[in-house]
Amino acid sequence: MPNLRRIVALVLSLLMLNGCAHYIGRKIVEPPDQHELLALDPSVAEQLHGQLFSNTARLAMSDGVELQVYWMPTGVYPHRYQLSQNEERFNLRFSMSLSGGPPRNTARGTIVLLHGWQVDHQQLLLFAMELGNQGWNSVLVDLRGHGQSGGEHVTFGVRESEDIASVLDWVREQPEFVEPLVVMGTSLGGSVGLMAAARRPVDAVVAVAPFADFGEILPNGLQVMAPGWMGPWLQPARIERALVHAEQRAGIRMADAAPILTASEIQAPVLLIHGKGDRFVPKAQSERLADSLPNARLELVDVSQHEVLLIDRDRLFDLALPWLDEVAPARPPVPENAN
């Protein structure tokens, strides 16, 4: 399975050959080609989509970009999941058995799942399957510039948070919607989820390895993920110039790509989960968020590889699901004749 370090190294090799801050800036905000990253064979994906999702929709955002959204109802989803890893590599194996679509259960709530950078909703399919087994509806989203969604630029939360606020409005309008409403995101998705929760009321947020300020993590993050011989090409001054070009190209201020700016406005309880040894997005980012959020719990786990934590579903759910039972318990069903 390709990992984030290899992806960044490939991108940076191209940057070095080009040697231009303008080119680096373009690559920062350019939609990634994630077709080979945690992606299923197209024929398998089509079959799964037909069996897993009760509804798919394309939602038009205020700037005309269309987002692809997938509704996966609670049900029984038999599957096996195994993650193994060592210092350099990790492998994820899974299998599933679906025939005729899963039987539906009574939902105990609805979770909007937000993936990380360079992947799409398929990163979180196994999350959604287990959440379905646990009684949750799941709504998976391809963030702008990713998967089947439109968008010419990735803006690291600036526009994505507006998008997800609109998705939350749409979710509440669906006949299958059941409260409580939760947002769960990994890395970029975690940061976007926090920013969206400052725009719309939700019942809880789970953010896995989020950044508090994208501009803070990018220079060091590139240095960490790149091979050592690329270091001279990643001088802070060059990256700073690249960020200026990225802002101009995407029409945003990178300073706004910072959930720390609106963290104090989030009234929902927030669970932050971060790897103690994460060098791509250091744990200090979640620590800053925890200090700024009105109602936060921070869980630091013994994981050093950023990308491994993002797919370590069982470790994350061991922390997140009991916490959700506590802060966002299932609510009594509304009688059919209620006004």
Image: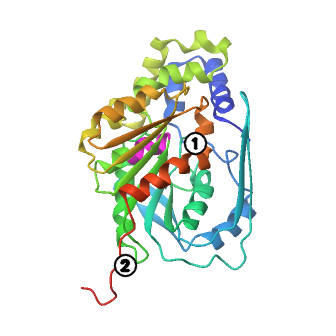
Q: How many marks?
A: 2
Q: Residue at x 45, y 60 (%)?
A: 111
Q: Position of residue 15 (x, y in %)?
A: 61, 22
Along the line of sight, which residue is nearer the eye, 296 or 243? Answer: 296
* Secondary element type, mark 2: loop
The numbered dot on residue 333 is 2
* Secondary element type, mark 1: helix
Q: Position of residue 164 (x, y in %)?
A: 39, 54
The residue pinned by badge 1 equals 310
Quarter of the image that includes the C terminus: bottom left
Q: Residue at x 59, y 45 (%)?
A: 315
136 lies above or below 146: below
Q: Amino acid at mark 1?
A: Leu
Q: Residue at x 58, y 70 (%)?
A: 53
Which region is colored magenta? 187-193
* Few, some or many residues within 10 Å of mark 2 (<14, 14–19, 20+): few
Report the magenta stretch's main SS. Answer: helix
Residue 156's image quarter? top left
156 lies above or below 52: above
Q: Position of residue 73 (x, y in %)?
A: 53, 71
What's the CA distance linking mark 2 and mark 1? 33 Å
